[in-house]
Structure formats: C-alpha cells, structure tokens
Image (cartoon, rainbow, N blue to C red):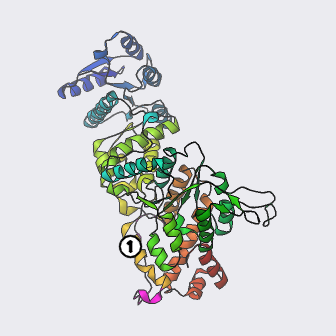
Amino acid sequence: MKPIWIVDDDQSIRFVLEKALMREDLPTRSFTHPREVLQALSTVTADEMPQVLVSDIRMPGGSGLDLLSQVKERLPGLPVIIMTAYSDLDSAVSAFQGGAFEYLPKPFDLTKAIELIRRALEESQREAVGAVDVDSTPEMLGQAPAMQDVFRAIGRLSQSNVTVMITGESGSGKELVARALHKHSQRASGPFVAINTAAIPKDLLESELFGHERGAFTGAQTMRRGRFEQADGGTLFLDEIGDMKFDLQTRLLRVLSDGSFYRVGGHSAIKTNVRVIAATHQNLEQRVQEGTFREDLFHRLNVIRLRLPPLRERREDIPVLTRHFLQQSAQQLGVEAKRISDSAIELLQDFAFPGNVRQLENICHWLTVMAPAQAIEPKDLPPEVLSPSAVVPLSVPVATTVVHAEAANAFQTMAPAVANPSAVNMPKPAVLNLPGEDWQSGLEVQAMALLVDGRTDVWDELTKRFEATLIQTALAHTRGRRIDAAHKLGIGRNTITRKIQELGLE
C-alpha cells in the first residue's frame, strides 16, 4: 500500500498522526516543510508516491497552500487534507479553491482525523480507477430493462419518418429521447426545433408555430417564420402537447394531414416537410374523453408511442447517472469532479425523485458547489434527500423541486371539487398543513432549478404557477364558486374568469 505523507513543522503533530495511522496498519512518511515534499516527489518510485497528503497550512519552510497548488499540478487526483491552527475564512476558502479534499482545523479529534484520512484513502482508490470521460459518455444512459426497451425502439425507428408520441413524467428526459430520435434518423442533417407549448401564452403560440405576416397584429412589424418553417427538412419537437388549446389543435391537425399551413395574417398556403415528435406528461386518452383534446389529433400523433419510465422505476441507473452528472457539472463549472460514496448512492436510490432525472442532475450540480469535500458522504446530500418530508414544494414539481407526497395527495383529492363541487364531500374548508420550510424556500428551489436549466422565461413560468396555485386552492375552498373565490383572493370576478381561461384551469 502507498504511504500517507504528513507535512508539519510541529513534531508532536507528526508523532501523534504516525502512531495513530500505524495502529490502523497504514504506512506513513513525514516531512517538516514543503521543500522536502517537492524534492521527494521528484525522486520516489511510483509505489512510493503518496496515497494521501496531510499538510499544515503555515510552516517556516513554506505555505501549505502553495504546496497544495504544486502537488495538484503533478498529481491532480491526490487527496490533500489541509491542517491549520488558524481557523479563518480566508484559509478555508483558499484551501477548497486550491482543490483540497478537506480542511481540518487544529486542535482536532484524533479519531475524526483518522476517519477523514480513511475517507481520503477511499477517494484516492476511486481516483486510481480513472475518471469518467464526459466527452465519451453516451448521449443517453441506462441499464434498466425499461430504458433498454426505449433504446431498442429508437434503433427500430432510425430508418422511419413516422410520428412519435413520447409519454413520461416531468423531468424524465422526453426531449433527450426526441433529440436521439432525430440524431439517428435520416433527417439528422436537418434542423431539430423544440418548443414547449405549455410555456408560451395562447395568444403567442399560434405565431410561434406558424409564423406571422407583417401587420398581422399589433407589434408585428416584420414577417416572421414559425417553428414549422424553421424545422423544414428536419424534426419539430412539440413538448407538453396535452396543454395545447383546442383551436390550435385544429390548425396542427391540418399541418399533420396535408403538410401545409398559413402564417398568421397570411393568405398563401406554405408547404413544409417536417417530422413531428410530440411529448406529454398528461393522460391524453382521458383528455379526449373530457373533450379537451381532439380525438382525431390524438390518433394522428399516437402512431408510435414511447413510454419513458420515471427514475423510481430505474433505480439501478442512479449510480451511473449520478457519477455522470457530477462529472458534467464539474466540467461546466471548471472545477475538479467530486466522487460519491456507495452509502450516499444508496440513499439516492431510496429517494423517490418526483422531479426524475432532471432533479438528480440538479442535485449533482448542488453537490458540486456545496459539498464540503471531494468525496460526497451521506451527510453531504441536500435536505430533500435526507428528509423528504421537510421540503415544501409549489403546486407543480420541476427540476430540483421535491413534492411532499401527503400534500400532493391531499391537493389531488380536492381537485375534483373545482370542476364539480359535489364530487367531494367537504363539510368545512379543507386545510393543507404543509410541514417544514416556508413557501418562499420552495420558490427559491424552483427558480434556481429553472435558471440552472438555462430557461429564459422564469418570471412568466413561476408567475403562472403561483397564480394557478392560488386560484385552484381558493376554488377548492369555495367548492368551485368563482365569485366567492375571487372575493377571498381580493380580485374581481372578471379577473378570476380571465385568469382561469389564460391558465387553462377550465
């Protein structure tokens, strides 16, 4: 076994650590100042190289931080533990910015120090196996049987231009599948254009899809090509198709039927050659029965259906996805990738992940920034994983949002009362007692998740959800009576009617 190198000008510190590590059957080598370490690195054999370096921060022979920097240049994967009797913020920040494995203030508990060194040894052994090359990682990862079915389907569809419907929960990776279908199709050289139909207001969505002529409406100062024209010769991905307004569904059906459409304000039909891939988390069969989704459009879109499993149905994929996202996040932030212990992975595998793969990705991003050491242990995981019931979400879970199951079930139980006041027997107003943090914290989580995702409509998106949550809760409280709900919210009757229409809460 390679030795643990100890660097400290204090002989008593070196002695104590040497004896403690010897009792653990761990070989050591000690130095009194950084110059000795650098000289030794130039002369020792590969087997004599350190497996862990434990260094003081301030020594007569030089700085531990300077040593950290020089050692990292030669051995970037070597875990370095910085010790100091000067427990100040600058030292801690400098140590971590330099790539230290951990920061150990003096005086330290010897048992905890040895435990920390053992953690560093585990990290060193994992590092020796070799880091995952992000660039060589496949575009989609998954060994679970359900994901293998998806991969096989993508392979079979690679030579076809047939319309595909992708179903799955929010955050499960529907757009990733759509991109894979495009990349491996005969249209790969053409454009891939994606649009989230639920994120664009009704009045703008028609123009976004089909474009508009100059002067078609106020503000239309120039002609604009829509997404169908932009995707000509390629693939158009219509995300959250189940939320599309009924009148727009009619126009979409025409395009799918004969490949032609009119720009808003236009009089000439435009032909387009586009493969459409749609996606939704909604139950479209149910929406067809409810009369909110056209049956003929449903059959036109539902030629081939791919169901993308939620992350809780593919828990065996969580380890490889976690390590991939940690590597990816480190590359994006320009820092050294962190490793995660098997015990921390087990906790992640036990977590329900209501936000699915997107939530796991954002947790890994959070860990890259916030975990105190290069090796992630169970205690380093975010609060929603360690104690899921302590986090309060907004009404719609996205990205890193964690849904409190009891609250979500309670709200879903009340939901029928909005459309049908007699559907639920509610002798007195229902109250949701949400435990844990205040709602502002949940808002912060969702806002950060959207920002990390690169969204540029965060204000509009969260405002819609905020308004929808208020209105749905007030309607449930008043058993669907709009006038009473408006009065209790402090808004006008016309305002609540307009908002219900705009937010699709009919």
| Relative depth, front residue between 489 and 244 | 244
Vertical order, 341 against 2 (above or below)? below
Q: Say whether residue 495 is visible.
A: yes
- Residue at coordinates 74% horizontally, 56% vertically from top-left? 224
Q: Say whether residue 336 is visible.
A: no
Q: Main secondary structure of the magenta part?
A: loop
Q: Give the residue at mark 1.
A: 409
As for residue 90 lying within the magenta part, the answer is: no
Vertical order, 215 against 345 (above or below)? below
Residue 199 percent coordinates (x, y): 59, 62
- Residue at coordinates 79% horizontally, 66% vertically from top-left? 218
Residue 244 percent coordinates (x, y): 57, 68
SS at circle 1: helix
Which residue is situated farthest in the front direction here?
258
- Residue at coordinates 58% horizontally, 42% vertically from top-left? 189
Q: Amino acid at mark 1?
A: Asn
Vertical order, 451 against 90 (above or below)? below
Residue 59 percent coordinates (x, y): 42, 20
Q: Exactly how many numbered labels are in the figure?
A: 1
Q: Which quadrant of the figure contains the C terminus?
A: bottom right
Residue 86 percent coordinates (x, y): 43, 32
Q: Which quadrant of the figure contains the N terminus?
A: top left
Q: Which residues are magenta?
A: 420-438
User: In this image, 173 relative to 249: left or right?
Assistant: left
Determine the image quadrant of residue 266: bottom right
As for residue 435 lying within the magenta part, the answer is: yes
| Relative depth, front residue between 143 and 414 | 143
